[in-house]
Structure formats: C-alpha cells, structure tokens
Image (spheres, rainbow, N blue to C red):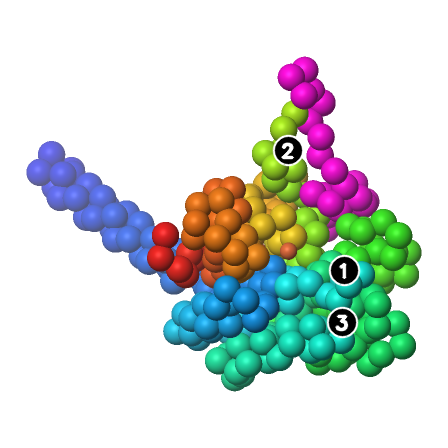
Amino acid sequence: MKRRDLIKSLGVTVGTVALSSVAEVSTAAQVKKKKVLKVAHITDVHIRPEHNAVARFKKCLEMIKKDKVDFILNGGDTIYAADYDNITKDRVEQQWACWNESVEVVKNIPMYHVLGNHDMWWQGKDDELGGKAGVLKMLRMEHNYYSFDKNGWHFIMLDSNHPTNPGMLDDEQWNWFVKDVEKNAKDRSTLIMSHYPLLSCTGIVDNKPDIRGPFKVSGSYNHLDILKFIEVFNKNKNIKLCLSGHIHLLDKVWYNDVTYLCNGATSGFWWEPGDDGKSAYRETVPGYSLLNLYDDGSFESEYIKYEAV
Ligand SMILES: [Fe+2]
C-alpha cells in the first residue's frame, strides 16, 4: 500500500471510529436519568391566627402551586400547638380552621402528612379532636404511619411520637417498618419522612458546648433508634433519602450512602419576628423544599425562601 493510500485508509478508519464514538455518546445521552417526580416538602407550618400567618402561608402555597409539583409532603407540626396543658377545644378548632382555609389554595394537589409533636390535643382525651385520632381526623389520614408508591419510588411515612420516648418508633411500628422495607423497597428507590430527624447535625449547632465538651445534644435532635435504622439502610441500598423537620433549622447530613435532610420550617420562627425580625430561627428563614426525584434513585433538593429576605 502506498503511503497516501495508507493515510486515506487511516482517515476512513479514524473517521469511522469518531462517528461510532459520537453514536455511543448520543445513545448514552438518550438513556440518561429521567426525572419522574417533583415534590414539595413543607414542615413545621405551625399555622395560627396570629402574625398574619394564614395569608403568609397561602402565599407559600401559591408558589408551590406554580411549581406544578406532583404532590406535597407535610412533615408535621401542622398547627401551632395543641399539646400544652392550657389549650382549650376552641383554640384547637381555631388552629385547624386556619389550616383548612389555607390549604384550599392547593386543594387539587395530593398531600401526604405525618404527625408532629405539637399537633395532638392530649387534654381532649374523650373528645373527637383529642390525641392522635383527632389529628388523623382533621388531616383525613387513615393511619399514623403508612407507605405508598409513586412513579417507581417508594415513600414511607413514619410517626416519631413514641408514647414515652419521643423521637423513636414503638415496637409495633418498628416491626411494620422493617417488613415494609423488605417487601416494598427491594426494587424501588425509597424516601422516608418523619417529624423528628432520623439523623441531623442541628443538635451540634443549636446548643452551646462546654468549653471542653462534650456537646450537649438532646434526644430530640436525632431519632433515639437511629442505629437500628442505619442497620436496615446498610442492608437495603434503595433507601436514598430521609426528610424531617422539628428543629426549624436547615441541614444536610450524608452517612453511609443515605442523605438526611432536615428541611427548616415553613413557619420559620413560628411566624413570630424571630432572630432577624423576619421570622428566622437562627440562620434559617421560613421556607419549603422542592425535590426532583429521578428514575436512577438520585435527587436534587432546594430550599425555597418564599418571603422577602
Ligand atoms: Fe415545630
């Protein structure tokens, strides 16, 4: 073969290789991950008649409506507080009326709830609004913990309100949870929502340590049974994301392939002026989170500050 022919031949070969590489790239581009769900996470709404909270929350919900989410996750502490000893039935009803008026804005968007520690009116033992049953009734929930599937993802909604040790599951719920993971999370990416964080770093920054330590992190900053959860997560790598609230601070913890997001508070400083005059609790202003979930189990999350800051 003459040198010129060799170059021609190489040129064709190189060209062919180059073309096939392009074809491979475009095939790879075609099979790239696909967004399957867009979800809003609100938590610690603490709705109340004071501080113009209803109008402010409605603005938040209007933004969520514009976001065109598939559904809303409500992480608990839905009403300001029903759990204190001095709360009357009138006050409980007043707070739920504020909630019902507000959520009219998103009445066409499905919403999934978990119970917060301030939602239960413990004083109303024999009343239809009393205890967990009263909250289930007001939020039209069938059970205090449950799971469901949507577009290839599995969602587990937990009740952290243990009767004697807040921030953990009782035996019955724990056994249900383990079975649910075994059955439903084996072939689906899974998101868990609880009111109390399963794992969070907010306890480190929300308390002043002694000069020589240790850091004083009380039980409510992390689920008391977190080590049991970690064991389950280590056996099932489809558990991707755990959402929570309760602390009113925004953090992101990654541990052993699982991401834990403590997603601030929709009410910020319970709608009050707070630490900056604009309802911030420490550095976290009122907000909600927008999540994009993908078919490969990946996700993105953004905290949306819906009031002028
Ligand atoms: Fe709260």
- Residue hosting label 1: 84
Specify the amino acid type for callout 2: Asn
Mark toward the viewer: 2 or 3:
3
Specify the amino acid type for callout 3: Thr
* Mark 3 surroundings: few (<14), some (14-19) or many (≥20) residues within 10 A: some
23 lies above or below 124: above
- Label drawn at residue 88: 3
* Mark 1 surroundings: few (<14), some (14-19) or many (≥20) residues within 10 A: few
Query: Can residue 302 be found in the magenta stretch?
Result: no
- Residue at the image point whose x is 19% and y is 41% from the top: 10
User: Would you say 146 lies left or right of 100 here?
Assistant: right
User: Would you say 34 lies left or right of 81 here?
Assistant: left
Question: Image quadrant for the N terminus?
Answer: top left
What's the CA distance linking mark 2 and mark 1? 24 Å
User: Would you say 174 lies left or right of 44 here?
Assistant: right
Where is residue 239 drawn, in percent x and y?
Answer: 67, 53
41 lies above or below 275: below
Where is residue 44 drawn, in percent x and y?
Answer: 60, 59
First to last magenta residue range: 210-236
Q: Are marks 1 and 3 in contact (CB under 8 Å)?
A: no
What's the CA distance linking mark 1 and mark 3? 9 Å
